[in-house]
Image: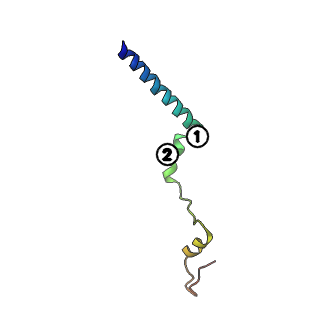
Amino acid sequence: MEVLFLTLLLSLILAAIFIILFYRDRIRNRFASPERDALIPFEEEKSRPANPRDREASEPADPRDGRPQA
């Protein structure tokens, strides 16, 4: 009888954990869907330098005078 009680208690704890985590995930990802999540690896990267000085250094130099192009 003790084994049945422990099994029931463990299954209720696991079910409560599942429900809590499922509800938390649904609230956090309100506008997400499995189709959108599956397409994330195919999205273009939107990277940009952290500050404007880094951008100037990363631009190709003008072959005529060696200065970065504006």
Residue positioned 55% across, 62% down in the render: 47
Answer with the quarter of the image where residue 52 lies: bottom right
Q: Residue furthest bottom?
A: 65
The local secondary structure at tag 2 comes to: helix
Q: How crowded is mark 2: few (under 14 residues within 10 Å), some or many (20 or more)?
A: few
Residue 44 is situated, as x and y percent measured from the top left of the image, at 53, 57
Q: Residues within 10 Å of mark 1 (few under 14, many from 20)?
A: few
The local secondary structure at tag 1 comes to: helix
Spatial distance from mark 2 to mark 1, Cα to Cα?
17 Å
Numbered marks: total: 2
Which residue is tagged 2? 38
Task: Residue 4: tell me if it is visible.
Answer: yes
Task: Residue 29: tell me if it is visible.
Answer: no
Answer with the quarter of the image where residue 29 lies: top right
Q: Residue furthest front?
A: 2
Which amino acid, mark 1? Arg
Which amino acid, mark 2? Ala
Q: Quadrant of the N terminus?
A: top left
Which residue is tagged 1? 28
Q: In which quarter of the image is the C terminus?
A: bottom right
Residue positioned 51% across, 50% down in the render: 40
Residue 19 is situated, as x and y percent measured from the top left of the image, at 52, 29
